[in-house]
Amino acid sequence: MFINFVLIVALSGIQLSTAEFYPVMTKRLPRTMKAVVLQKYLPISDPSSLIDMEVNVPELEDSQVLIEVRAISVNPIDTKIRAPKGEALNATRILGWDGSGVVALKGSHARTFNVGDEVFFTGDLRKNGSNAEYVAIDEIMVGAKPKNLNFEEAAAMPLTSVTAYEALFDRMLLSAKDKGKSLLIINSAGGVGAASIQLAKNVGLYVIGTASRPESEAFSRRMGADLVLNHKEDLYAQLKVSGFSKGVDYIMVNFDPYPYWDLLMKIIKPQGTICLVVDCSRPVDIRLLKDKSVTLVSEMMGTRIRYDTEDKDRHHEILQEISKLLEYKKMKTTLTKVIAPINAANLRDAHRLIEERRMIGKLVLSGF
């Protein structure tokens, strides 16, 4: 029937808009879908913290694509949003802003991807996410899935890779001109840390990671770190012994900066740059930056989307660049654990693993 329709349209010369054409292709889309939802801010030990529910398939805006979700990644931001708060949740939410899948439908203004394209994506924290069979996402938050990766391997990469890319190249302004300079990544065995190691090595930096367990140290080295220090011991002393008595040129902090603040001021070189990726739990004295003329920057993936900046399309450009780096084997997936299928019980287990800080690399859930 669909083939006959296409022939009639082609032979008659009828011009149809995308919005008119693609609904014909996707009449078989269901009205409802499986989803894992958040209804109350609860500890992950509570079975009601995340629950299975049948909900409506999201309606599509003009600039969006509807993606049939094949795999999702779980990130610390998911656990922070779900965690107990001194307020009530206003409306049911679907978490998850990292995944991979297949384009099932496209809006009338969507031009980059077509139905059937395999993609990976981040998401908009203000909207429902990917812990569902279908998710509606603006095209600028979608990239082509690397052809050499399966859906699970691809789902591990978008959010952390965009965060790492923005932190290194858009915030710290690193490039090939900095070849040979030193970058210290505090907490290098997580998703952002692992992506940052690889991106920094691609432009020739000497990368120093930090970890506390033999397996996380080994993972950091597999990602390409030149040196891995133990962040539960004196980092300053370890740097001195390793030949960095004058400090390091750049520091990326993938952990609460507060307990490290005085150390950061001590080990950063004059005119160096520090990037904070994680929120600071308590106020710190930024006056300490002045003596060495240190640049302090911060990174929040999604700033361009949230504030509708003039350069918001860069989000898509970065995803496309990450896809190419993965295809050209300039990066490798940071996936270390897969749980199947996607449901509330397994997502609660995933949140628990992240909250207990037992994860190395990225955790992905696969299939409904």
Image (tube, rainbow, N blue to C red):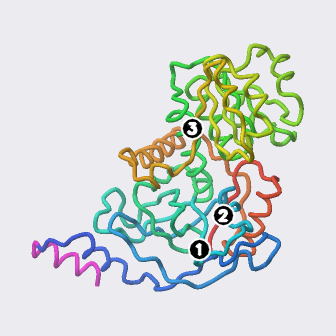
> Against 286, is 292 above or below?
above
The amino acid pointed to by label 3 is Ala
| Magenta portion: prevailing SS class | helix
Determine contact: label 2, label 1, CB under 8 Å.
yes
Instruction: Name which of mark 1 and mark 3 comes first in the sequence.
Output: 1
How far across and down, in percent of the image, does residue 91 sit? Answer: 58, 78
The answer to whether residue 264 is left or right of residue 112 is right
Query: Disc 1 designates what residue?
Result: 93
Residue 88 in the magenta stretch? The answer is no
Query: Disc 3 designates what residue?
Result: 167
Which residue is pictured at 56% across the width and 34% down the height?
A: 168
Which residue is pictured at 66% across the width and 25% down the height?
A: 289
* Residue that extends furthest to the right in the rendered view of this protein: 233
Viewport quadrant of the N terminus:
bottom left
Q: Residues within 10 Å of mark 2 (few under 14, many from 20)?
A: few
The amino acid pointed to by label 2 is Ile
Determine contact: label 2, label 3, CB under 8 Å.
no
Residue 9 in the magenta stretch? The answer is yes
Query: Disc 2 designates what residue?
Result: 81
Which residue is pictured at 55% across the width and 26% down the height?
A: 203
CA distance for labels 1 and 3: 28 Å
The amino acid pointed to by label 1 is Arg
> Against 48, is 208 above or below?
above
Q: Residues within 10 Å of mark 3 (few under 14, many from 20)?
A: many
Q: Residues within 10 Å of mark 1 (few under 14, many from 20)?
A: many
Label 2 SS: helix
How far across and down, in percent of the image, does residue 63 sit? Answer: 34, 63
How far across and down, in percent of the image, does residue 274 sit? Answer: 64, 30
